[in-house]
Amino acid sequence: MSDDVTDRDYCLAGGERPPKADGPPYAACVRCQEPTEYPETYKGITLCPVCEWREAERTACSG
């Protein structure tokens, strides 16, 4: 794996990530309603860092 590719990028199952927000307002997490790192205007599924981590654990690539 090259230096510019992380495990997080390598194991993406859902495709591209939404763009990071420069500041509030932030989109609410679709699972727990906590603020995410993504802009409120983003259309699509957004997860907070905790739910994103749990989803990554659940769907982790094993090799």
Image: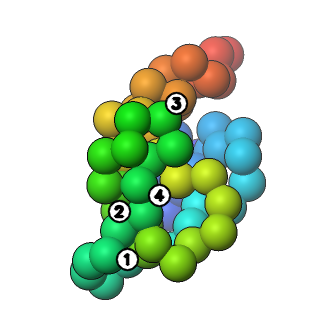
Q: Is residue 2 visible?
A: no
Q: Residue at (41%, 55%) from the top-left corner?
A: 28
Foreground label between 3 and 4? 3
Foreground label between 2 and 4? 2
Q: Earlier in the sequence, mark 1 or mark 4?
A: 4
Question: Mark 1 — residue?
Answer: 21
Q: How far apart are marks 2 and 3 (CA)?
A: 16 Å
Q: Distance between the residues labelled 3 and 1?
A: 21 Å
Question: Mark 4 — residue?
Answer: 3
User: Tag 4's secondary structure?
Assistant: loop
Within 10 Å of disc 4 (Cα), the crowding (few <14, some 14-19, many 20+) is: few
Within 10 Å of disc 1 (Cα), the crowding (few <14, some 14-19, many 20+) is: some
Q: Are marks 1 and 2 in contact (CB under 8 Å)?
A: yes
Q: In this view, does 33 lie to the left or right of 62?
A: left
Q: Which of marks 2 and 3 is nearer the N terminus?
A: 2
Give the answer, above or below, for where 14 lies relative to 55.
below
Q: Distance between the residues labelled 1 and 4?
A: 25 Å
Q: Residue at (64%, 16%) from the top-left corner?
A: 62
The disc at residue 37 is: 2
Q: Is residue 18 left or right of residue 20?
A: right
Question: Mark 3 — residue?
Answer: 56
Q: Earlier in the sequence, mark 2 or mark 4?
A: 4
Residue 63 lies in what quarter of the image?
top right
Q: Which residue lies furthest to the left in this view?
A: 23
Residue 58 lies in what quarter of the image?
top right
Give the answer, above or below, for where 60 lies relative to 1.
above
Within 10 Å of disc 2 (Cα), the crowding (few <14, some 14-19, many 20+) is: many
